[in-house]
């Protein structure tokens, strides 16, 4: 089965579009299996990494809507095999509030590899490998 024939690829792409648009509540929850977990590997914003449940992801999404005035997930590549989809993504986020030494309006960038695992057409696990560009004012 090619990437294009794998139905999980379309779900993964719709999920990233929804997150780009700050989806929340039932709209966001519709993508996830009830046993969903999100593992964010150590990075510049979370040096110890982070593990979140579905409820915690919902809360983080709400916080993101307050901290960013805009964001975009540009999917550069997809790889699918069975119940796994791997996405190579360029994320940009425009700050609505200052973060560290970064002012409002600063555009943050991260190069991301996301591994999504599916069960019954829903995302049951997500692992993010986020490589942020230097967090310094422009």
Image: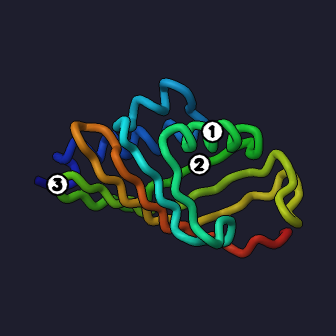
Q: CA distance from mark 1 to mark 3?
A: 30 Å
Q: Which residue is mark 2?
A: 72
Q: CA distance from mark 1 to mark 2?
A: 19 Å
Q: Earlier in the sequence, mark 1 or mark 3?
A: 1
Structural crowding at the residue carrying mark 2, measured as other residues with C-alpha within 10 Å and reported as few (<14), some (14–19) or many (≥20):
some
Q: Which residue is mark 1?
A: 59
Q: Which residue is mark 3?
A: 82
Q: Nearer the viewer, residue 94 or 123?
A: 123
**Side of 135 where 59 appears, left or right:** left
Query: Which label sits in the foreground, 3 or 2?
Result: 3
39 in relation to 43, above or below: above
Q: Nearer the viewer, residue 91 or 65?
A: 65
Q: CA distance from mark 3 to mark 2?
A: 27 Å
134 in relation to 56, above or below: below
Query: Which label sits in the foreground, 1 or 3?
Result: 1
Q: Earlier in the sequence, mark 1 or mark 2?
A: 1
**Image x and y of residue 66, in percent:** 76, 39
**Image x and y of residue 122, in percent:** 31, 38
Q: Residue furthest bottom?
A: 134
């Amino acid at each position: 089965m090619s990437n294009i024939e794998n139905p999980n690829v379309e779900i993964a792409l719709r999920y990233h579009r929804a997150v780009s648009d700050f989806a929340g509540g039932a709209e966001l929850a519709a993508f996830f299996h009830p046993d969903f977990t999100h593992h964010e590997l150590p990075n510049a914003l979370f040096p110890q990494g982070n593990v979140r449940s579905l409820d915690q992801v919902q809360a983080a999404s709400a916080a993101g809507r307050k901290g960013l005035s805009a964001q975009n997930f540009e999917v550069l590549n997809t790889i699918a095999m069975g119940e796994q989809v791997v996405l190579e993504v360029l994320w940009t986020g425009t700050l609505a509030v200052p973060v560290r030494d970064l002012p409002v309006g600063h555009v943050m960038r991260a190069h991301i590899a996301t591994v999504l695992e599916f069960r019954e057409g829903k995302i049951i696990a997500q692992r993010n490998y986020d490589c942020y560009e230097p967090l310094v004012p422009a």
